[in-house]
Amino acid sequence: MGVKIVPRHGNSLKEKLYLPAIYGGLKTTISHFVTNLKDTSNIKTMAYPEVMPDDITDRYRGIHRLTKRKDGSVRCVACFMCSTACPADCIFIEATERHDGVDEKMPEKFSIDLLECVFCGGCVEACPCDAIRMDTGIFSFIAEKREDFVLDKEALLDNNAFEENGND
């Protein structure tokens, strides 16, 4: 059948213990340590959270937000496209009828579990009416309880700082 037997390398004890590889890694680490110890002015540090990062690009995917129409109503039509496209299955929507004649339905409950979210942006791409965005610029979300990481509809609508500035 043409089976090729490949000889195995690393039969010595020194090679089986990976000593050359460990030595090479330690050599690199120690050389960086000594270089930084001699000249500490080249070490790049940031006093976070007192000093916020300034190298965040416009394409950064921050915390989600729900957008509003000009009349102040929610743009979401509860089509479930975002929750269907979500690979982490972290978007939960409960639909209700809409009585103002703008659309057929709207979300009664809309929540996103940030602990399960992988911030892929699939929900933003799947939304047909541009109701959900990830352009808040909020990259650090801190809470004390797991329940605080589940953002409901009101919290997602409160993340509309960009809309108020005219960046909608």
Image: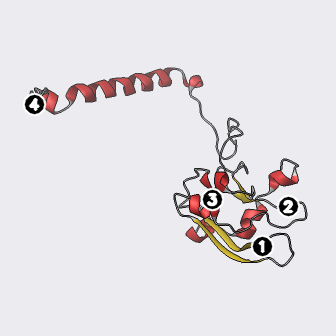
| Spatial separation of the CA atoms under disc 3 and disc 4 | 58 Å
Nearest-to-viewer mark from 1 and 3? 1
Q: Which residue corresponds to the image point at 64% horizontal and 71% vertical from the top-left? A: 93
As drawn, the residue found furthest toward the front would be 1
User: CA–CA distance between discs 2 and 4?
Assistant: 68 Å
> CA–CA distance between discs 3 and 2?
29 Å
Residue 142: which numbered mark, if any? 3
In three-dimensional space, the C-alpha distance between marks 2 and 1, rounded to whole angstroms, equals 15 Å
Which quadrant would residue 10 be assigned to in this image? top left
Q: Quadrant of residue 109?
A: bottom right
Mark 4 and mark 2 in contact (Cβ < 8 Å)? no
- Check disc 1 and give the amino acid type: Glu
Pick whichever of labels 3 and 2 is earlier in the sequence: 2
* Camera-side residue of 95 and 63: 95
**Disc 2 vs disc 1: which is toward the camera?**
1
* Residue 127: % across, % down: 68, 57
Residue density around tag 1, few if under 14, some if 14–19, many if 20 or more, within 10 Å: few
- Residue neighbourhood size for the residue with mark 2, other residues' Cα within 10 Å, grouped as few (<14), some (14–19), many (≥20): few
Q: Nearer the viewer, mark 3 or mark 2?
A: 2
Question: Helix, strand or loop at disc 2?
Answer: loop
Mark number, residue 104: 1
Dot 4 lies on which element?
A: loop
Disc sitting over residue 112 in the figure:
none
Q: Using residue 151 as the reference point, say whether residue 164 is left or right of it.
A: right
Residue 143 makes an appearance in the image? no
| Residue 15 to residue 53: above or below | above
Query: For mark 4, what is the residue?
Result: 3
Q: Nearer the viewer, residue 138 or 79?
A: 79
The amino acid marked with disc number 3 is Ile
